[in-house]
Image (cartoon, rainbow, N blue to C red):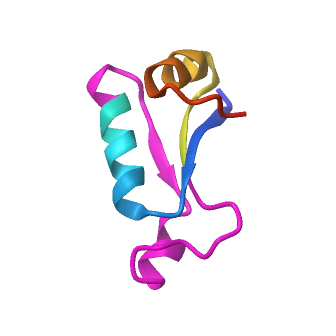
């Protein structure tokens, strides 16, 4: 199953908070590009930012929960 990005941030703490929120309601979520932020002191310098990804089949539910229109 293809993972889909549902949230993007430059802040590691925010990424983990969002990921935990999704997991708490049963949506499997992962944090991508975290390493670039760890090197930069908690802020990502990666152009793609730190992304939260979920299975494509649960992307709509994740976006609804987060209240963000991510593409």
> In the image, is residue 36 above or below residue 16?
below
- Which percent across, then down, holds residue 33? 56, 63
Residue shown at 63% from the left, 35% from the top:
3
Residue shown at 59% from the left, 23% from the top:
59
- The answer to which quarter of the image holds residue 26 is top left
**Quadrant where the C terminus is found in the figure:** top right
Q: Is residue 36 magenta?
A: yes
What is the total number of numbered labels drawn onto the structure image?
Answer: 0
**Quadrant where the N terminus is found in the figure:** top right
> In the image, is residue 45 above or below residue 17?
below
> In the image, is residue 14 above or below residue 40?
above
Task: Depth check: give the residue in front, 64 or 39.
Answer: 64
- Which percent across, then down, holds residue 11? 44, 63
- Which percent across, then down, holds residue 70? 66, 34
Q: Is residue 49 magenta?
A: yes
Looking at the image, residue 52 sits to the left or right of residue 18; the answer is: right
Magenta stretch? 23-50
Task: Depth check: give the residue in front, 8 or 36.
Answer: 8
Task: Depth check: give the residue in front, 56 or 63.
Answer: 63
- The answer to which quarter of the image holds residue 19 is top left
Residue shown at 56% from the left, 30% from the top:
68
Looking at the image, residue 57 sits to the left or right of residue 16; the answer is: right
- Which percent across, then down, holds residue 40? 48, 83
């Amino acid at each position: 199953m293809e993972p889909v990005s549902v949230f993007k941030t430059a802040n590691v703490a925010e990424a983990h908070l969002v990921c935990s929120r999704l997991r708490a309601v049963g949506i499997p979520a992962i944090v991508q590009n975290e390493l670039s932020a760890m090197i930069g002191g908690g802020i990502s310098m990666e152009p793609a930012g730190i992304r939260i990804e979920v299975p494509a089949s649960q992307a709509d539910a994740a976006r609804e929960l987060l209240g963000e229109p991510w593409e």
